[in-house]
Image (spheres, rainbow, N blue to C red):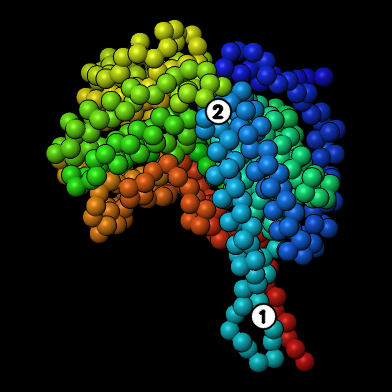
Amino acid sequence: MTTQQTISPIDGSVYAERTLATASQIEQTLHNAVVAQKSWKRTPLPERAAVCQRAVQYFIDHADAIGLELAWQMGRPIKYAPNEIKRGFQERAQHMIATAAGALANISVQEKPGFQRFIRKEPLGVVLVLAPWNYPYLTSVNVIIPAIMAGNAVVLKAAAQTPLCAERYAQAFAEAGLPAGVFQYLHTTHDYVARIIADQRIDFVGFTGSVAGGRAVQRAASERFVATGLELGGKDPAYVRADANLTDAVENLVDGAMFNSGQSCCGVERIYVHQNLYDAFVEQAVALTETYELGNPLHTTTTLGPMVRTSAADFAKNQINEAVGQGAKTLIDPRKFLAHQDATPYLAPQILVNVNHQMRIMTEETFGPAVGIMCVQSDEEAIALMNDSTYGLTASVWTQDVEAALRIGDQVNTGTWFMNRCDYLDPELAWTGIKDSGRGCTLSALGYDSLTRPKSFHVKVW
């Protein structure tokens, strides 16, 4: 019997220990999913919606308890942790439920005498969801709810750091009356995940995680004609134009860089500021960052919790130190935060200047509470720097000129373009990335396309 342990970044204790599924248990899970899906796809859409709404209500009713679990599992401050359910999760789930009828409706074609013709959107079958630890509910809900609404069965593999999230889903769907087998979860290893992906009973894989993880999913699926949706990394840029509302830009971009200890795929990781605002922006960004309170996430005053593990904090530190060795300057004194940060997951926030694109801090994903700020002289320079990346998830511009924002947005290679906003997913818009940020689409009416297949009906009437 093999087990996995969840080590809490709060204090290094074992918060959860789970037995990993055996080969026979995995086989039974896949068998159950196939059987359950055959009847679930025949369930009328209003009944599917009612079940999913009840499941969402379970999460809302238990949001505070779930938030406490998240704090222990991955370190997000309890001040914010329940909001993953109360805000983003609820908003996305309810939108995807509400939009299902239109998104899944038959597609009519031009009338033709003597024929009935239409395109039906059929469920794929069994959907495997591989969820990360940093936003385990916000990322998984993008696929789980629409997959079930579309008539699929779902098997969830949660990150080893956040295993209780999978169990919460199971409890929610059980209380909501979802038939057995339509939703299941597995605690298992990466090797077994690769075998599951290769299994003919899996009809779609939705993965959120690192670029390396995405490549591993692709390798596992390479011998099959199975579709994969990949939401991977980011090095998301922001450009503050000369006409920006400085206070608003500082407040939102510092939050976009530091929230969740910077552990967000669409967090702000590099900022370009027009020379007319550069000095003032940097000064105000430093002042705001120094107001953060780094500490135990169970304390209600804490605004910056530990990173998920010590190795993650060390990775970010190494990028910072390497940049300093190349000429960058740090503006935050870590000693203003916790006295002892070495060999712990607790990492003080950091702002760097004198940075350039020869430094990893400006080109490779940091996934920590650190951001580099560069001075630029024009829109053209900012556009070139924003596009100088292997990633393309989100990007933002801060300006009072809507036409300029749209013009610049047309030239920036990204999945989502923001004006005066960042680090947010609108469920009515497609969530997608380009380049190493992944492929495929979740959310919006388009999010149902990857979870269904078109089936044409061509009926000649005698």
- Point 79% across, 53% down: residue: 37
Residue 462 is marked as none
Q: Secondary structure at mark 2?
A: loop
Write down the quadrant of residue 220 in the picture: top right
**Amino acid type of the residue tagged 1 in the rendering:** Arg
Residue 331 spot, x, y in % from top left: 27, 20
Residue for badge 1: 117
Tell me if residue 56 can be seen.
Answer: yes
Between 110 and 399, the one nearer to me in the picture:
399
- Point 75% across, 89% down: residue: 461
Residue for badge 2: 78
Is the residue marked by circle 2 packed among few (<14), some (14-19), or many (20+) residues within 10 Å? many
Write down the quadrant of residue 372 in the picture: top left
**Amino acid type of the residue tagged 2 in the rendering:** Ile
Q: Quadrant of the C terminus?
A: bottom right
Tell me if residue 385 can be seen.
Answer: no
Between 252 and 364, the one nearer to me in the picture:
252
Residue 174 spot, x, y in % from top left: 80, 44
Marks 1 and 2, how far apart at CA: 54 Å
Q: Quadrant of the N terminus?
A: top right
Is the residue marked by circle 1 packed among few (<14), some (14-19), or many (20+) residues within 10 Å? some
Badge 1 or badge 2: first in the primary sequence:
2
